[in-house]
Image (cartoon, rainbow, N blue to C red):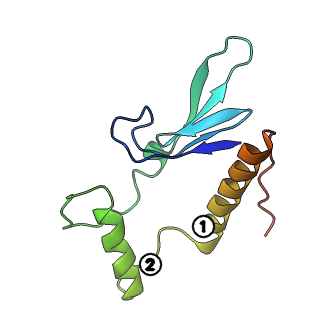
């Protein structure tokens, strides 16, 4: 797995995290699978659609991309809301990023260790 991230509006990824794997690509909130025969990619999961029904923080001005998430985080700290993600979710993300770094360093595929 290889990870790439950027924060330039003119970047091809639009400043989003991209993870490239041997079996697919995670980019822009979607998981794409690669077809080895046709060399085309197809969306197999759309996380924007999956998380659409989740509660949203209301009354937050969308001044910038992270405003809503930051407001919800502060509400969680103050005990006004429950987190939408768990410690295990965070650990899975860290495990995927560690595997991506190891893959980028070695140039070889690295399995993600989610055994914790």
Question: Which image quarter: residue 73?
Answer: bottom left
Question: Which image quarter: residue 79?
Answer: bottom left
User: In the image, what residue occupies the spot 28% across and 64% down?
Assistant: 67
Instruction: Look at the picture and state if 11 lies above or below 61.
Output: above
Q: Position of residue 53 (x, y in %)?
A: 40, 54
Q: Is residue 82 left or right of residue 37?
A: left
Q: Sort mark 1 into few (<14), some (14-19) or many (20+) by Cα contacts within 10 Å.
A: few
Q: Is residue 33 left or right of residue 48?
A: right
Mark seen at residue 82 = 2
Q: Position of residue 30 (x, y in %)?
A: 52, 39
Instruction: Look at the picture and state if 43 lies above or below 55.
Output: above
Label 2, secondary structure: give it. Answer: loop
Q: Which residue bears the numbered disc 1? A: 90
Q: Sort mark 2 into few (<14), some (14-19) or many (20+) by Cα contacts within 10 Å.
A: few
Q: Quadrant of the C terminus?
A: bottom right
Q: Position of residue 76 (x, y in %)?
A: 40, 81
For marks 1 and 2, give the CA distance.
15 Å
Q: Quadrant of the N terminus?
A: top right
**Observer-nearest residue: 91 or 52?**
91
User: In the image, what residue occupies the spot 80% across and 46% down?
Assistant: 110
Q: Position of residue 93 (x, y in %)?
A: 62, 59
Label 1, secondary structure: give it. Answer: helix
User: In the image, what residue occupies the spot 51% across and 46% down?
Assistant: 5
Q: Residue furthest top?
A: 38
């Amino acid at each position: 797995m290889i990870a790439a991230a950027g924060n330039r509006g003119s970047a091809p990824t639009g400043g989003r995290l991209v993870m490239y794997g041997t079996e697919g690509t995670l980019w822009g909130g979607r998981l794409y699978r690669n077809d080895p025969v046709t060399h085309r990619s197809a969306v197999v999961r759309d996380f924007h659609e999956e998380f659409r029904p989740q509660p949203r923080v209301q009354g937050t001005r969308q001044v910038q991309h992270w405003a809503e998430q930051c407001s919800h985080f502060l509400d969680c700290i103050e005990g006004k809301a429950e987190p939408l993600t768990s410690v295990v979710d965070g650990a899975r993300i860290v495990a995927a990023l560690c595997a991506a770094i190891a893959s980028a360093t070695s140039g070889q595929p690295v399995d993600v260790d989610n055994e914790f």
